[in-house]
Image: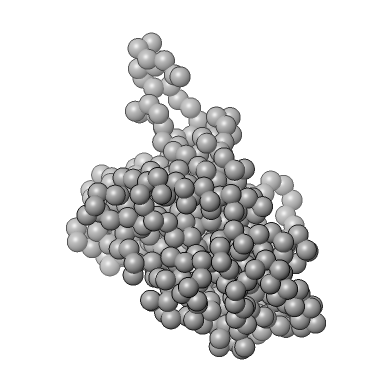
């Protein structure tokens, strides 16, 4: 159906804003989760919010499924296309509309990269706090969709904590604004429901973000440990002591091996685990707490403390951590990045269990994660040539569900997307999921906005997302709903 409307899309957006070449369409068949691939019928490249609204309006009228796409760096299949639908790419909406240093905020379009916001704010002594590892390439529109966090989310929170308002195009093609200039808006928190909804409630076209003042002092260290357990216990002791670092990251030996092969960040190749700990704030407070952190590391058996001497060395340390996912490709061409959360006090339990599960599956798992808030990112390594792909997918799913069993969550920041939608009943009751479906249906009654993501796939062929409607065979008494 989208192809017969090509002329209408061209008239609304421009001839160079409609992609239908089969080869070019393949560029949009997946996001960072490459195990799921679907080629869309068309890709649309609007340049303005008005053009986005025009494209969505056509889709709404014709009931054509559409999927918004940013930089395609997502890791849960959240931007997976629909075969008989269109992809609406926001890559051309990349203007920084305003930097307002007095009110400490910026107004940006969704195609602006995360890091470019901080670069634009830097001359005013300000920055944008959320910092996903992909911040050089991931876009703020995608960050809003996934409620991204990053290494510094322990102290500064997630994207939702740094957004004042969003301009959105709703699934019927109309435009509205959620939130406002004030951090306190009366009524239901519609902005909060939209952030992290994974593009299922509409398309963001403009975002007003909060900016923070750069901290007066920043201190960073890397602490080696003889075991992952010792490193995990150190994190628990640190938080129990009342110290809230800006960031606490952990990498195991496999991840360190990959990072050193890729970027030579100076991590110890002979250690079982390393913690990257960063403190920031007033100089006096940072100095006192940094000394306390050093002592806690020693108390828990650190074998080496590397303290970054200056901003340049600190940048090298973080270059290694932020390159970890890509670097794993040096030791395994195929891997699945998982994302789950466990209570911080159960980090050791979770990591021990993951190691046992990996051994049972005959696969390697590399662990790189935000230790401070228990957000695990196990990378399941496999070889397609050895026929390990199916086992790797099963292990990845089992790890995510293990996090729920331990009292955590299926996702900390990568989202549910296509990857973990069928695991949602492990975390939420049927009533919970029905409530989510009703909220979604209030925004998108026809189920055309990023369908098939976030919520479980309907169990009966022909069921529609949203408010429950009986299947025709059920209505005829041929089958029963279980």
In this rendering, position of residue 325 left or right of residue 120: left
Nearer-the-camera pick, 98 or 420: 420
Question: Percent x, y for residue 442?
Answer: 54, 39
Question: Percent x, y for residue 248?
Answer: 62, 67
Position above or below: 162 against 5 = below
Question: Percent x, y for residue 470?
Answer: 43, 21
For the question of whether residue 266 can be seen, the reply is yes
Residue at point 71%, 68% (across, down): 299
Residue at point 75%, 67% (across, down): 243
In this rendering, position of residue 305 left or right of residue 4: right
For the C terminus, the quadrant is: top left
Nearer-the-camera pick, 71 or 4: 71
Residue at point 30%, 63% (across, down): 333
Query: Which quarter of the figure has residue 227?
Result: bottom right
For the question of whether residue 81 can be seen, the reply is no
For the N terminus, the quadrant is: top left
């Amino acid at each position: 159906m989208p192809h017969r409307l090509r002329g209408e899309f061209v008239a609304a957006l421009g001839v160079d804003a409609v992609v239908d070449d089969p080869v070019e369409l393949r560029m949009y068949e997946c996001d960072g989760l490459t195990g799921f691939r679907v080629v869309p019928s068309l890709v649309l490249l609007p340049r303005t919010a008005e053009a986005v609204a025009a494209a969505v309006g056509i889709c709404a009228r014709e009931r054509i499924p559409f999927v918004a796409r940013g930089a395609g760096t997502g890791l849960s299949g959240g931007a997976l296309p629909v075969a008989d639908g269109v992809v609406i790419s926001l890559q051309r909406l990349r203007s920084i509309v305003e930097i307002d240093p007095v009110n400490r905020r910026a107004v940006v379009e969704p195609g602006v990269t995360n890091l470019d916001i901080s670069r634009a704010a830097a001359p005013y002594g300000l920055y944008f706090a959320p910092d996903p590892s992909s911040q050089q390439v991931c876009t703020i529109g995608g960050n809003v969709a996934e409620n991204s966090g990053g290494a510094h989310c322990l102290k500064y929170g997630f994207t939702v904590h740094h957004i004042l308002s969003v301009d959105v195009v709703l699934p019927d093609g109309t435009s509205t604004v959620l939130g406002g200039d004030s951090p306190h808006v009366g009524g239901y928190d519609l902005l909060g429901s939209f952030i992290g909804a994974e593009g299922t409630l509409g398309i963001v076209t403009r975002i007003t973000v909060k900016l923070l003042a750069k901290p007066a002092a920043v201190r960073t260290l890397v602490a080696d440990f003889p075991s992952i357990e010792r490193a995990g216990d150190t994190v628990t002791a640190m938080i129990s002591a009342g110290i809230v670092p800006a960031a606490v990251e952990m990498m195991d030996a496999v991840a360190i091996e990959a990072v050193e092969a890729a970027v030579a960040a100076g991590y110890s190749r002979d250690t079982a685990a390393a913690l990257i700990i960063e403190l920031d704030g007033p100089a006096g407070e940072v100095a006192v707490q940094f000394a306390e952190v050093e002592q806690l590391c020693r108390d828990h058996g650190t074998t080496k403390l590397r303290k970054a001497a200056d901003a340049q060395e600190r940048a090298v340390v973080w270059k290694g951590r932020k390159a970890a996912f890509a670097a794993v490709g040096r030791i395994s061409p195929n891997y699945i990045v998982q994302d789950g959360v466990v209570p911080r006090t159960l980090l050791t339990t979770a990591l021990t269990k993951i190691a046992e599960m990996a051994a049972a599956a005959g696969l390697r798992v590399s662990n790189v994660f935000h230790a401070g808030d228990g957000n695990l990112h196990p990378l399941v390594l496999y070889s397609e040539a050895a026929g390990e792909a199916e086992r790797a997918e099963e292990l990845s799913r089992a790890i995510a569900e293990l996090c729920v069993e331990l009292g955590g969550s299926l996702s900390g920041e990568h989202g549910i997307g296509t990857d973990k939608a069928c695991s949602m009943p492990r975390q939420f009751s049927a009533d919970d999921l029905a409530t989510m479906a009703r909220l979604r249906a209030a925004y998108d009654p026809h189920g055309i906005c990023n369908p098939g993501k976030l919520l479980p796939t309907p169990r009966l062929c022909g069921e529609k997302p949203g408010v429950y409607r009986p299947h025709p065979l059920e209505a005829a008494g041929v089958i029963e709903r279980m």
